[in-house]
Image (spheres, helix red, strand yellow):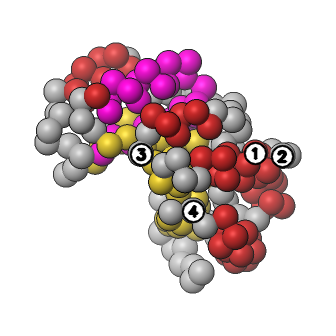
Amino acid sequence: MNHILFPITYTCNLDCPFCDLQGKSEEDTEKCMDNILKMAGSIEWVYITGGEPFMVPNLIEICDRLKAAGFKVGVTTNGTHFLPEVAEHVDRIGISLDGDKDFHDAGRGEGVFDKAIKLLKAVKGKCETVAMSVALKDNGEALERLKPILERIDPTYWQIQRDVHDDTVLIAV
């Protein structure tokens, strides 16, 4: 075990139909930080997740504390809170992209795709970039249409994971 997922908030500015985090109570971030910091030296990566971590006012401070303790830090975002300066305080930023613009915006809201792509381009070269997709029953073609867009932007990684709520999904991209 060399990775920790650290959900610093369950608050999000979007209401995606596939997300089941809305309505969960907030974790005590400081208590979690204390526990994570105790693991410095035995854990390599801390991945900050949510909800939407970029909505946390002291996100950069949290990242800096983790980096100072020797962790590599990644943060996952939906890309709608445009804070490219976070890239200077982390090793990796993952940005959710469900498919091409039409598919992504249909599930997350008008204009969300463009904001995510803008952030992906803005942080490229400042830290590792990850385009994060989930293979759903109905987004195989949308992921195919996303592929040439990502080839032009050239993120460090394109992560495609299976929908944890549907173990029958198979996709070849």
Q: Position of residue 127 (x, y in %)?
A: 48, 49
In the rendered view, tell whether residue 80 sits above or below residue 57: below
Labelled disc at residue 111 = 2
Mark 3 in CB contact with mark 1 (< 8 angstroms): no
Extreme-left residue of the structure: 42
Q: Position of residue 108 (x, y in %)?
A: 74, 47
Res 138 → quadrant: bottom right
Q: Position of residue 88 (x, y in %)?
A: 49, 37
Q: Residue at horizontal 85%, vertical 46%?
A: 110
Res 40 → quadrant: top left
Q: Residues within 10 Å of mark 2 (few under 14, many from 20)?
A: some
Labelled disc at residue 115 = 1
Residue identified by numbered label 3: 91
Distance from Cα at disc 4 to Cα at disc 3: 13 Å
Q: Is residue 138 left or right of residue 155?
A: right
The amino acid on which the numbered mark 2 sits, given as a three-letter code, is Gly
Residue situated in front as seen by the camera: 118 or 107: 118
Is residue 64 located in the magenta-colored stretch of the structure?
yes
Residue identified by numbered label 4: 155
Is residue 172 located in the magenta-colored stretch of the structure?
no
Res 147 → quadrant: bottom right
Mark 3, mark 1: which one is toward the viewer?
Answer: 3
In the rendered view, tell whether residue 111 sits above or below residue 172: above
Residue situated in front as seen by the camera: 129 or 146: 129
Q: Residue at horizontal 57%, vertical 62%?
A: 155
